[in-house]
Amino acid sequence: MDMKPHEFWQHLDAPGTHPTGPGTRYHGAYPATLPDGRQLLLPIRDLPRGDGAAVASLIVNQAGFAVEDALADIMAAHWRDAAPEVVVGVPTLGLPLAHAVARRLGHERLVPLGFSRKFWYTDALSEPISSITSPDISKRLYLDPRMLPLLQGRRVLLVDDVVSSGTSLAAVLRLLATAGITPVGISVAMTQSTRWKQALPQPELVRGAIASPLLKRDGDGYIVDEGAS
């Protein structure tokens, strides 16, 4: 697949445009499939651990608006019947999706979490967090204490971009639990493998618009790592 880096995530292809399924060898890109069969080409990234493992990448704030809209449409549809009363957005890449999902659910606002500590924030409403894309960087995630009245006693939908190992999402859930909040659902644009299920207390709450597997290098291409979860 010969695509320039800036060309990924810009458009959706018709169903069946790209081969996928058991035994398929991928060269540079993996085609994730939307519920209606359309495909989104994702660049394949080698993981830094050096064992040939790789993942398909989605950077939502670099995506074309049509792609972002399509993902947000699916995410909102997944949870509309659950009647969430407020959306909580996870920074950084979960925030544009959270805005889009909240609007589609008819909400007038959302509650964003943040990495920047304002002077009125408290350590009690914070949690250390890291991610697969920044494994050597640990930050603190904060919930603005002024937002608590919007969350307590209400049906909360948590929105993020990608869940992979589940480490960062588990930290988000711990932060919300500190405030006495348990989401009714977790909406993500993409589930990346199934490793995250081991890290989360209620993995059944997670619904993704698209899914991608763990991959491994095989000669000049990549195949699905059937031995990995």
Image (cartoon, rainbow, N blue to C red):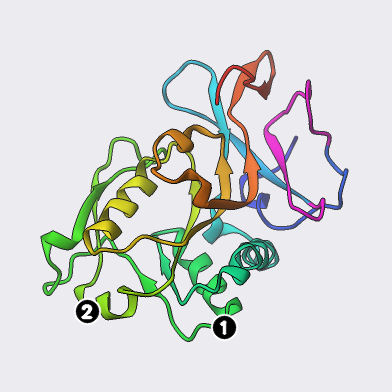
Where's residue 64, x and y in %? 65, 63
Question: Element at badge 1?
Answer: loop
Secondary structure character of the magenta stretch overall: loop
* Residue 188 among magenta residues: no
* Residue at the (27%, 57%) spot, across then down: 177
* Residue at the (74%, 52%) spot, across then down: 34
N-terminal of the pair, mark 2 or mark 1, is 1
Q: Which residues are magenta?
A: 19-38
Q: Is 98 on the left or on the right of 145, as rendered? A: right
Question: Element at badge 2?
Answer: helix
Q: Is 82 on the left or on the right of 160, as rendered? A: right
> Which residue does the numbered mark 2 point to in the structure image?
146
Where is the C terminus found, in terms of image quarters?
A: top right
Image: 78 above or below 207: below
- Crowding near pointer 2: few (<14 within 10 Å), some, many (20+)? few
- Name the kind of residue labelled 2 in the image: Arg
> Which residue does the numbered mark 1 point to in the structure image?
106
Image: 162 above or below 218: below
* Residue at the (52%, 75%) spot, across then down: 102
- Crowding near pointer 1: few (<14 within 10 Å), some, many (20+)? few
Splitting the image into 4 quarters, where does residue 143 fall?
A: bottom left
Where's residue 179, x and y in %? 23, 64
Splitting the image into 4 quarters, where does residue 12 fall?
A: bottom right
Where's residue 61, x and y in %? 52, 61
* Residue at the (30%, 48%) spot, across then down: 171
- Name the kind of residue labelled 1 in the image: Gly
Where's residue 57, x and y in %? 57, 42
State the separation of the CA atoms marked 2 and 1. Answer: 22 Å
